[in-house]
Amino acid sequence: MLSSRSIVTAALACCLAASACADRDPPTATPSALLHRDDIALGAPVDITLRFRLARGAAPLAGNHRVLLRFLFDDGTVMASYDHDPPTPAHEWQPETPVTYTRRIFAPEIPYVGDVPVVVGLVSASGKRLPLFGKEVGDRMYEVARFKLHAQRILVVPLDGWHRHEGDGEGGYRWTQSRATLTFRNPRLDSVLHLRLSAQPDVFPAPQQASLHIGSRAVHTFPVAANQTDYQMPLTAADFGADDEVLMTIAVDRTFVPPEVQKGGDHRELGVRVHNMFLETSGLR
């Protein structure tokens, strides 16, 4: 009869053998990434092009696979996650045929500046991470790029008309009321206001109309899409006026209170969701 020590030793040997076998799984694909900027401000939008190339002779990937996309701190811990389903499902990928797509993400707004490694992975619906070609940083995550994160030059500050922040990561947002104000230092330069917004499409028969006002003047008016959508609003130096501080208002033509439209028990007046906002000024990225 085997002793308890022998049973534990045998079990440990089996676990180690299984781990070793898992580590010897052949790499499935080669990942790569291109950031369209390599020096990014906190909270700024950046386009990242991801590319996966299945290895020659690799078996087709069965079922759904999710792309793990992470920014890391310099100690290797996760700063931000942008995990997503690839636009071309992984089970349709073909060996030696690159799959390339571009996503716009917003850098996190955190108290950190410095180098940021970008890592990716592939995970199946069952939670198994696939081995890939490249520089592994642990747990089958692979470094594909680096960039520098720096402080914002122009800080956009919400004032009145905003509800509390809800959600985490890319899904986080703040609801506006009918009018939500914000302020920032006058850059006195041509700029672009980046907004990521979404609406509640099943409440209104037609899309809500949003407008941006500086003072009493509307500088942009546009419909708000149901899903998260990025808007780039060009603003001239003249639009900002002569004051040192700019007061801007985001206004929507219709709001709702959820219980009044059978959408739950939240009694707040809701306008649109604001997921991200960033003022990019010519020469001051």
Image: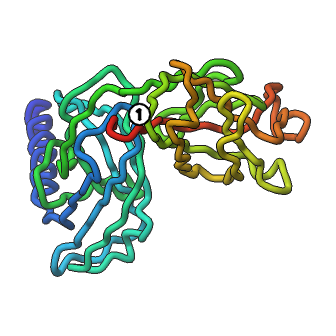
Q: Quadrant of residue 7?
A: top left
Observer able to see residue 185: yes
| Residue 123, above or below 111 | below
- Kindly identify the amino acid type of the residue bearing the numbered disc 1: Gly
Say left or right for 41 vs 200: left
In this rendered view, identify the residue nearer to me: 277 or 275.
277
Pick the quarter of the image with the N terminus: top left
The residue at which mark 1 appears reads as: 43
Q: In which quarter of the image is residue 264?
A: top right
Say left or right for 146 vs 10: right
What is the x, y in percent for residue 53?
Answer: 23, 71
Say left or right for 214 vs 206: left
CA neighbours of label 1 inside 10 A, class few (<14), some (14 to 19), many (20+): many
Residue under the image location 55 percent in, 36 percent down: 238
Pick the quarter of the image with the C terminus: top left
Residue under the image location 19 percent in, 49 percent down: 145
Say left or right for 206 vs 181: right
Observer able to see residue 1: no
Residue under the image location 31 percent in, 26 percent down: 151
What is the x, y in percent for residue 105?
Answer: 41, 46
| Residue 52, above or below 194 | below
